[in-house]
Amino acid sequence: MNIVVDDLSGRQIAEFLEEHVQEMRSITPLESKHALGLDELRSPEVTFWSVLDGDALVGCGAIKKLDAGHAELKSMRTSSARKRSGIASQLLEHILTEAKRVGLTRISLETGSAEFFRPARNLYQKFGFGYCEPFGDYQLDPKSVFMTRTL
């Protein structure tokens, strides 16, 4: 597998992300959906990675810089066919290493509180994330949980 910085110009990643947004919309009410669209992910504050297995796109993830030392983890997704195969762990390890390398000292995230999101919450806990209060522009929301960790 290869983890690469992606400029989000390809059709394959656009379709992959559209599936992500549609899935989140089907699970979470619109007012509680925080997945970024393609245009938002192209902002200068965001670094986006794709995970490729040969030519197949099997995962993605990003960080959005909030300030000089703090970033938010965004758009973590593994293809349905490859869930629970270690891709998310490899990608998260890569993202945390890169975040530390560029001088970030804290990574936070928002994810869903529903049972559907339990595997994601378990992954984040495995990597040292702990539950926290809302950060940035987030507000308390029973459909969301917030996690953070220092690097």
Image: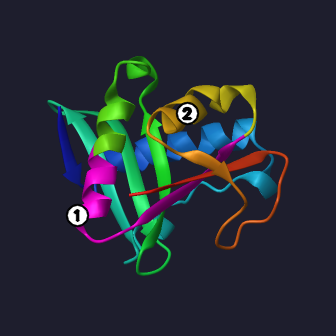
In the picture, residue 89 is in which quadrant? Answer: top left
What kind of residue is marked 2? Ala
Residue 2 in sight in this render: yes
**Relative side of 26 to 43, left or right:** right
Q: CA distance from mark 2 to mark 1?
A: 24 Å
Q: Would you place residue 63 above or below residue 110 in this image? A: below
Q: Nearer the viewer, mark 2 or mark 1?
A: 1
The one of 40 and 123 positioned closer to us in this rendering: 123
**Relative side of 95 to 81, left or right:** left
* Residue occupying the point 33% across, 52% down: 96
Residue 65: percent from the left, percent from the top? 44, 72
- For label 1, the residue is 101
Residue 11: percent from the left, percent from the top? 32, 49
Q: Residues within 10 Å of mark 1 (few under 14, many from 20)?
A: few
Q: Which mark is residue 120?
A: 2
Q: Which residue reaches farthest bottom?
A: 68
Q: Which mark is residue 147?
A: none
**Relative side of 55 to 132, left or right:** left
* Residue occupying the point 27% across, 46% down: 94
Secondary structure state at the residue bearing disc 1: helix
Residue 107: percent from the left, percent from the top? 47, 59
Figure quadrant of the C terminus: bottom left
Residue 8 in sight in this render: no
Q: Give the mark nearer the N terminus: 2 vs 1.
A: 1
- How many numbered marks are there? 2
The one of 125 and 138 positioned closer to us in this rendering: 125
The residue stretch that appears in magenta: 94-112
* Residue occupying the point 35% across, 47% down: 13
The one of 118 and 150 positioned closer to us in this rendering: 150
